[in-house]
Image: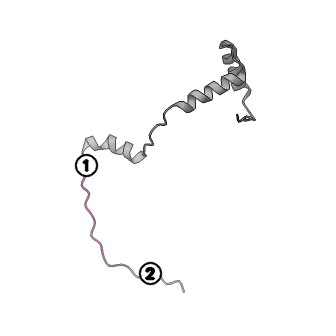
Amino acid sequence: MASITIRNLDEGLKQKLRIRAAERNHSMEDEARDILRVALAREPVAGKHVVDAIRRLIEPLGGVDLAVPPRGPMRKPPRFT
């Protein structure tokens, strides 16, 4: 079995873990292991893109046709001399 060390754990978080472990008659190590097991056993949420979320919100409102401005000839680049 592998082991890990968690450094710089907030004292308040450690206290909550200690209390939770005591309420369940577990050691802090057992409780931390159970928390990790449950958290990592969950199905990952499918990645959602911001664009898709915005499209779902806006699409029911209808689209907007924007006029495309006419294009002119390309300008000459500036000379820096």
Residue 69 painted magenta: yes
Quadrant (top left, top right, bottom left, bottom right) of the N terminus: top right
Q: Position of residue 81 (x, y in %)?
A: 54, 87
Task: Name the mark nearer the viewer: 1 or 2.
Answer: 1
Does any portion of residue 12 appear in the rendered image? no
Q: Earlier in the sequence, mark 1 or mark 2?
A: 1
* Magenta region, residue range: 64-73
- Kindly report the distance in space between the C-alpha atoms of the residues bearing marks 1 and 2: 37 Å
Count of numbered badges drawn on the protein? 2
Main secondary structure of the magenta stretch: loop
Residue 36 painted magenta: no
Q: Secondary structure at mark 2?
A: loop
**Left or right, residue 70 beside residue 30:** left
Does any portion of residue 33 appear in the rendered image? yes
Q: Is residue 38 above or below residue 2?
A: above
Q: What residue is shown with label 2?
A: 77
Among the 4 quarters of the image, the one containing residue 74: bottom left
